[in-house]
Image (spheres, rainbow, N blue to C red):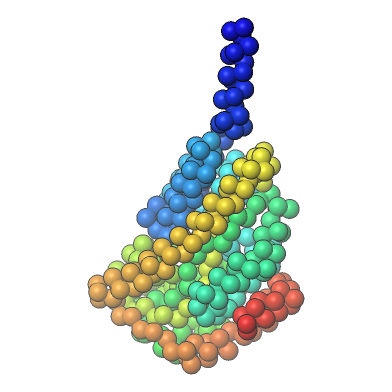
Amino acid sequence: MKLRISLVAGLLAAALTGPAWAAVTGKFAVTLSEKTHQGQGVAKFVELVKAKSNGEIDIKPYYNAALGDDVKVTSALQGGTIEFTVPVTTTLTGMVKAYSIFDFPFLFKNPEEADKVLDGPVGQKLLETLPAHGLVGLAYWENGFFNATNSKHPITRVEDFAGLKFRSIQAKITQETIRALGANPVPLAIPELYTALETRTIDGQGTPNAVIAALKLNEVQKFLSITRHTYSPFIPLVSKAFWDKLTPAQQKILKDAAIEARTYQRQVARQQSDAAQKAMAERGMKVNEVSDAERARMRERVQPVWNMFTPDVGQDLVGQVEAQLKK
C-alpha cells in the first residue's frame, strides 16, 4: 500500500513539474569584452536561456577572445568542440559566398534599413544555408556602421581617401572597397592595429564607433569621419553537432532567446555608438559628419566593387535586397 502511494505521489509530482530534461551545458566564445555591445548581447542571451529553460540549459561565456578569434572558434563549432559563438557575418563568406552581400559598401543608409533586410526573407534565406556547413544561425545582431579614422585630415569628400594607408581585414571585398575609395589597403589583425596607428605604419582604419573607443584608437587617431561606409552584423551561431542533440523544445528556447536578445543588443549597440562618439570628441578627437551628397558620391565610386562581387553573391539576391530597400 505504501509503495502504491509513493508511486502515485511520484507520478503526480512529475505531472505537475513537467518532463525532466538532462542538464545541457555549452561554451560561448565571445571576441570582445562583456562590457561591449557584443558582450552585453551574449550576457542577455545566456540569462534568457537560463530563465526559459528553468536552469536546465547552462551556457558559460568566454569573453575577450579567450577561446580564439572568430575564424578559429567558428571552425571549432563545426568540429563540435565549442557550442556557441557570435562572429561578424564576414567570417562566413569563405563557406557561403552569399554572405558577402552584407559587406557591400554603402548597402544600407541607416539601421532601420539593415534591420528590415536582416530580419526579413533575405536574412532567413541565408540562415538556411548554414546547417550544410555544420552551423545553425539563430538571428542577426548589430556590430554597427563602420566609420573612418585617420591621423592626417578629416574625410569630407571621397577625394580625401586618396593615398591614405588604410587598415583592411583579409576579406577581398574590404580590400577592394578601400582601393576603390582611393586609399591603399593594408591587411592587419586587430591586435596589431593600435601599434601600427601609433607608429604611423598606417594612417587610418574603419570600425564602428564603439569598437574604436574600446580599442582606444582615439589615442592614436586625430580624425573621426562619420562615413558609414559599411554595415556589419553579428550572427549568433550554434554548433550543429550540439544542436542536433537538443530536443525541439530546447532548440526553440535558444532561437527565441536569440531573437529576444536581438532587440536589447541592438539598442545597446546604438547607445554605445552615440556615447563613444561623444566621449571621443570630448577627449579631443575631431569628429565630422559626411553629407548625404558626398556619401552618395562615395557610393558611386565603389560601384565597381558591387559589380565585381555580384556574381559571387548572385544577381537574384542582390535584386531582392535592392527591391526591399526601395520599399
Seen in the image, is 226 located left or right of residue 253? left
Q: Residue furthest left?
A: 283
At x 46% / y 84%, what residue is drawn? 161
- Give the left or right position of residue 6, taking residue 62 as reference: right
In-front residue for pair 151/103: 103
Q: Quadrant of the N terminus?
A: top right
Q: Residue at x 54, y 40 (%)?
A: 53
Position of the C terminus, as image quadrant, is bottom right
Quadrant of the image occupied by residue 140? bottom right
Question: Can residue 105 be seen in this snapshot?
Answer: no
Q: Nearer the viewer, residue 177 or 247?
A: 247
Relative vertical location of residue 276 with respect to residue 20 in this rendering, above or below: below
The image shows residue 109 at horizontal and vertical percentages of 52, 81
Residue 121 as seen in the image, left or right of residue 214: right
Q: Please say whether residue 316 is visible from this viewpoint.
A: yes
Q: Position of residue 174 (x, y in %)?
A: 56, 73
Viewer-proximal residue, 30 or 26? 26
> Residue farthest to the top?
1
Residue at 30% over, 80% down: 286
Q: Residue at x 68, y 68 (%)?
A: 121
Q: Nearer the viewer, residue 116 or 19?
A: 19
Pinpoint residue 51: horizontal percent, then vertical percent.
Answer: 48, 43
Q: How many marks?
A: 0
Query: Residue 295: x and y, percent?
Result: 49, 87
